[in-house]
């Protein structure tokens, strides 16, 4: 039976073209800055998001950790959403490895308010840590893949900058955000100081993310990456696939969003109701009178459908390039039969 894997867009497999270019990639020792394919990727990625420089890293988590480490000093307090990926799902790296404490704000709608930000920014007081960084996320995972409009990103960034605090954007799915908002990515990230975006999710590269910012910031982040053991040698093999990801896989994200909408509109089931659909995320609420959520996930898995648990009675369904229209039709049928 064919498995329809809707757990996440992290499961995307590289395209045939990615595998071909990986095989013939021109490589060198990237620790010495001599991998031509990495250099080309970092230059193109920086241009793509309108920043001075960019760094190829192993994962989105590493990119976010490097941003926190590089913007802050140990002992700083960083301000971020209580539902942010950096706070919820990055293993406490900001405390253990960056030595900062988290000040969380309500980002249930995908971003916190300027009012809440102002109340969290530390003033001068002998008792206070310094507010060292503000982190945002777009699209926002725990808010259901919601895209945050430019004006909200800019408003928070402006307020942070008025208090000399830098802003990092966790843009793991920033290209899903621009697809949803029909914005240019350069405009959407213009006011943030650093942005991380994932190559290995909707863009389907096998590995990696990009961290972009000023040249000075990226030079420091590169050194921090080396300290974390993230200096890579002939990484052009991975960069070749990443170049295909940014050159060819951004425009097709609209297809994933269309399939998410198709699923949301087609769901007609006694066991789940539609909670939300944003970008490539569909959130379903389980009727716990009929199924407990974990039991339903197991039953779906038995039928060849993989989904994620997203809350006590919520499922997350994420569409991506390896999901077809026919797959979505089958998922709708299976839910209607349950
Ligand atoms: C907003 C955001 N920022 C960062 C990351 C981390 O990226 P990786 O470290 O997995 O490459 C993720 C991954 N998200 C993954 C998923 O959604 O399946 C899991 C939860 O880690 C993310 O959603």
Image: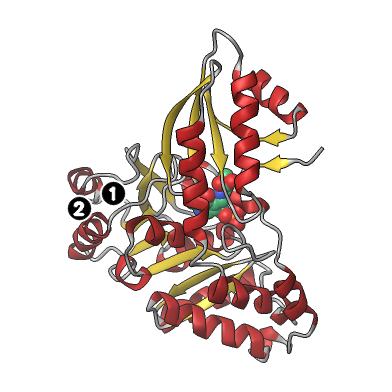
The crowding category of the residue bearing disc 2, from other C-alpha atoms within 10 Å (few below 14, some 14 to 19, many at least 20), is: few
Q: Is residue 262 left or right of 291 when viewed as pictured?
A: left
Name the residue rendered at 44%, 45% in the picture. Answer: 145
| Element marked by disc 2 | loop
The crowding category of the residue bearing disc 1, from other C-alpha atoms within 10 Å (few below 14, some 14 to 19, many at least 20), is: few
Name the residue rendered at 51%, 56% in the picture. Answer: 255
Residue 5 appears in the figure: yes
- Report the Cα–Cα distance between label 2 and label 1: 8 Å
Residue 193 sits above or below residue 7 on the image: below
Between 276 and 82, the residue placed more toward the observer is: 276
Colouring used for the render:
secondary structure
Name the residue rendered at 30%, 70% in the picture. Answer: 187
Q: Is residue 105 left or right of 139 when viewed as pictured?
A: left
| Residue 37 placement: quadrant | bottom right
Q: Quadrant of the N terminus?
A: top right
Residue 6 appears in the figure: no
Rendered location of residue 77, percent (x, y):
37, 51
Query: In this figure, which residue is indicated by the disc labeled 2?
Result: 123
Pointer 2 with pointer 1, Cβ within 8 A: yes
Between 212 and 48, the residue placed more toward the observer is: 48
Residue 269 sits above or below residue 69 on the image: above
Q: Is residue 305 left or right of 66 when viewed as pictured?
A: right
Q: Earlier in the sequence, mark 2 or mark 1?
A: 2
Rendered location of residue 113, percent (x, y):
23, 45
Q: Quadrant of the C terminus?
A: top right
Rendered location of residue 180, percent (x, y):
38, 55
Between 170 and 20, the residue placed more toward the observer is: 20
Query: In this figure, which residue is indicated by the disc labeled 1?
Result: 128
């Amino acid at each position: 039976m064919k498995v329809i894997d809707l757990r996440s867009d992290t499961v995307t497999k590289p395209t045939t073209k990615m595998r071909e270019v990986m095989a013939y990639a021109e490589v060198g020792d990237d620790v010495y800055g001599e991998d031509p394919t990495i250099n080309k990727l970092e230059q193109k990625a920086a241009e793509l998001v309108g920043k001075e420089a960019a760094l190829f890293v192993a994962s989105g988590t590493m990119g976010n950790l490097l941003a926190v480490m590089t913007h802050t000093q140990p002992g700083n307090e960083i301000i971020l959403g209580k539902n942010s990926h950096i706070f919820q799902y990055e293993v406490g790296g900001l405390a253990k490895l960056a030595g900062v404490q988290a000040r969380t704000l309500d980002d249930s709608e995908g971003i916190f308010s300027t009012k809440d930000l102002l109340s969290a920014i530390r003033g001068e007081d002998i008792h206070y840590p310094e507010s060292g960084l503000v982190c945002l996320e777009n699209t926002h995972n725990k808010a259901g893949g919601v895209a945050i409009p430019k004006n909200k990103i800019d408003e928070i960034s402006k307020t942070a900058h008025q208090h000399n605090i830098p802003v990092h954007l966790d843009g793991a799915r920033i290209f899903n955000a621009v697809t949803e908002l029909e914005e240019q990515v350069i405009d959407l990230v213009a006011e943030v100081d650093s942005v991380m975006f994932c190559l290995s999710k909707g863009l389907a590269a096998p590995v990696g993310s990009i961290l972009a910012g000023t040249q000075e910031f990226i030079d420091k982040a590169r050194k921090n990456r080396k300290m974390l053991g993230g200096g890579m040698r002939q990484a052009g093999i991975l960069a070749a696939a990443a170049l295909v990801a940014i050159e060819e896989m951004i425009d097709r994200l609209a297809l994933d969003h269309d399939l998410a909408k198709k699923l949301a509109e087609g769901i007609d089931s006694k066991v789940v109701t539609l909670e939300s659909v944003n970008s490539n995320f569909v959130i379903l609420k389980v009727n716990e009178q009929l199924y407990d959520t974990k039991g339903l996930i197991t039953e779906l898995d038995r039928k060849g459908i993989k989904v994620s648990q997203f809350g006590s009675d919520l499922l997350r369904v994420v569409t991506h390039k390896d999901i077809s229209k026919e797959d979505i039709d089958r998922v709708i049928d299976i839910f209607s039969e349950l």
